[in-house]
Image (cartoon, rainbow, N blue to C red):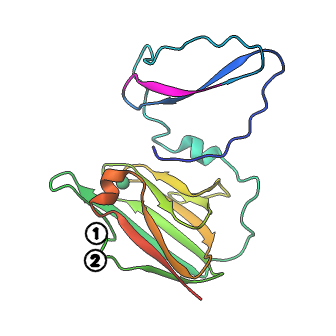
Amino acid sequence: MAQRLDIELDLPPGATAFPVLALREGARERTGIILAAPGATVSKLASLSDAAHPAFDPDLAQESSLRAANPLATRPAERKEMLMLSGSMQPYVWTINGQTWGNHQPIAAKSGQRVELMFHNMSMMGHPMHLHGHVFQVVGIGNRRFAGAMRDTVYVPPMASVTIALDAGEAARWMLHCHHMPHLVSGMMTEFAVGA
Ligand SMILES: [Cu+2]
């Protein structure tokens, strides 16, 4: 949910067509694009799959298997912050470190600092966490450290923790929020306040 990827594909030669589908979790709906070589026969696909699609990567097995082609330079973190993700359905309020947007405590850093943020999800909903103005590297899942993918959004499953590392960029206020819009609008946003 809410992930974003840049994908480079090598397609085999020949007049072939390759559907790339987005699947709705827990339901049969699907949509997508078809990559087709010149002269390929493009047949129409049903908008419903035969069976409901399972939840994607709920234990982060795939995320754990990814390694950055161009990782961050190795250096120790100068700032480490834990961000507690929580909330409830009734009332419908979602928080970071117990606060909604407007009552939030900014996460502060200086431009150029290596920062590690651990997203600790204490709720029963998954949260795709997105930081503006930066790319970051996934460097830990639970207690396990590894040189994972470069991203700008990372999915944090229920009751899981994911650690990211980044070099703080331009001095500005950068939004840091759950990319699931109903969570965002009901409070789940803070700011990464980068000083000069
Ligand atoms: Cu969320």
**Left or right relative to 149: residue 15:** right
- Who's the residue at 53% across and 60% down the image? 143
On the image, which quarter does residue 53 sit in?
top left
Q: Position of residue 159 (x, y in %)?
A: 37, 53
Q: In the structure shown, which secondary structural element does the residue marked by tag 1 occupy?
A: loop
Residue 61: percent from left, percent from top: 55, 42
Image check: 174 left or right of 102? Answer: right
Residue at 40 percent of width and 22 percent of height: 28
SS for tag 2? loop
Q: Which residue is mark 2?
A: 103
According to the picture, the residue beneath numbered tag 1 turns out to be: 100
Question: Up-down: is 22 above or below 118?
Answer: above
Quadrant for the N terminus, please: top left
**Separation of disc 2 and disc 1 at Cα?**
6 Å
Mark 2 residue type: Asn
Does the magenta run of residues contain 162? no
